[in-house]
Image (tube, rainbow, N blue to C red):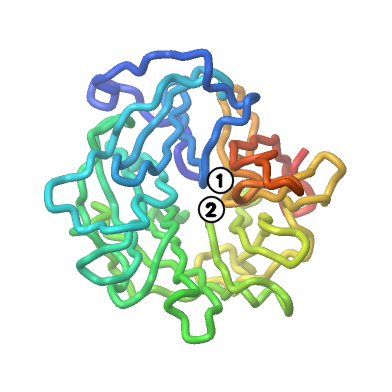
Amino acid sequence: MKFSNLNIPVSDATNPKIVPVNTLNRKTSNKYPCRDPYILLYDNKYYFYQGAGRNGVICSVSDDLENWADPVKVLPIPENFHGIKDMFWAPECHYYKGHFYIFSSVFSNKTNHRCVSVYRADNPLGPFVDIADGCICPKDWDTIDGTFYVDPQGQPWMIFVHEWTSMPDHNGGMCAAKLSDDLTHFISEPIELFRAKDRGEGYNGVTDGPYMYTDKNGHLMMIWSNMYHGLGYFVAIAHSETDTMEGPWTHQEEFLYCKDLRPDFTIDGGHAMILNDKDGVTKILMHGPNGKKRDAEGNIIDFEHLLIYDIVEENGTIKIK
């Protein structure tokens, strides 16, 4: 399977310089609070990245995807930082050619838009520093949720959301652009892969949480999230008909995850990513429910937390086991 962050080389140069302290009160099974989770496997440890607003980006470490160390700050906010709100949405950490890169979004006072930037470090716990001068995407767009993909020819890409907030019809787009080899800037104009409402009538205009996956037969697909009346947040699958980024892209009718798709899917959930665990089992991670859930009296009965499921390849697509 060809997707990012498998078999990252281990060396003194890429080993973290700090050691997080383990704690017993942060467990996946106890509904670890999070939104837009991203977990990287490096040297038999799992690194769980989350945005922390004015505290930058934080990371927790685990040996087993269940018990998590106290988070440490890996991306401190630099002096005179351009972000003014919506700080560090959906950070992802990818390894590429000897370095670790965080892709994350902020609302920038440089552009007065949401934007994606890229941050680099020599190890998964940083400190990460900005290498894209605050914004790598078109500066007159609202852009979020940057993710990373290297195609079979070795060309790196960033796939990202052109937010509905800066689209005239409020119909968000999923876009991609080729990256320079140092990941500091685009070397092609962004191409639009599809729009949110291409799924059909009644779907929300939100494009959210892209993540690329290539199956054992070289078939390229994208998981992404949207919302639908009565179902809430869900995870959908789009397929490239040419198995290239240029597509065209078509939408699988059946969801990968949504509330009530199966009896055990009791809450909505989305903004998913895929990884192989230490044992080679392919897993999907997302958060659910989408926001706080309250009873008739207004008491909180559930909140956003980490969800993990095994997935399998079947009939040219993926499904939750």
Q: Quadrant of residue 226?
A: bottom right
Numbered label attached to residue 211: 2
Q: Quadrant of residue 295?
A: top right
Viewport quadrant of the N terminus: top right
Q: Can residue 27 be seen in the rendering of this structure?
A: yes
User: Is residue 216 in view from this perspective?
Assistant: no
Across and down, in percent, residue 180 comes to: 27, 59
Q: Is residue 25 above or below residue 48?
A: above
Q: 50 or 274, which is in the foreground?
A: 50
Confirm or deny contact between disc 1 and disc 2 (CB under 8 A).
yes
CA separation, marks 1 and 2?
6 Å
Q: Residue at x 52, y 13 (%)?
A: 24
Secondary structure under badge 2?
A: strand
Q: Quadrant of residue 202?
A: bottom right
Residue at x 29% of width, y 23% of height: 16
Tag 1 residue: 273
Q: Residue at x 50, y 74 (%)?
A: 164
Label 1 sits on what residue type? Met
Task: Of the two numbered discs 1 and 2 on the same chain, state the one appearing first in sequence.
Answer: 2
Looking at the rendered structure, the kind of residue marked 2 is Tyr
Residue depicted at x 29% and y 52%: 118
**Other residues around mark 1 within 10 Å, as few (<14) / some (14–19) / many (≥20):** many
Find residue 213 and report its horizontal and vertical position in percent: 58, 50
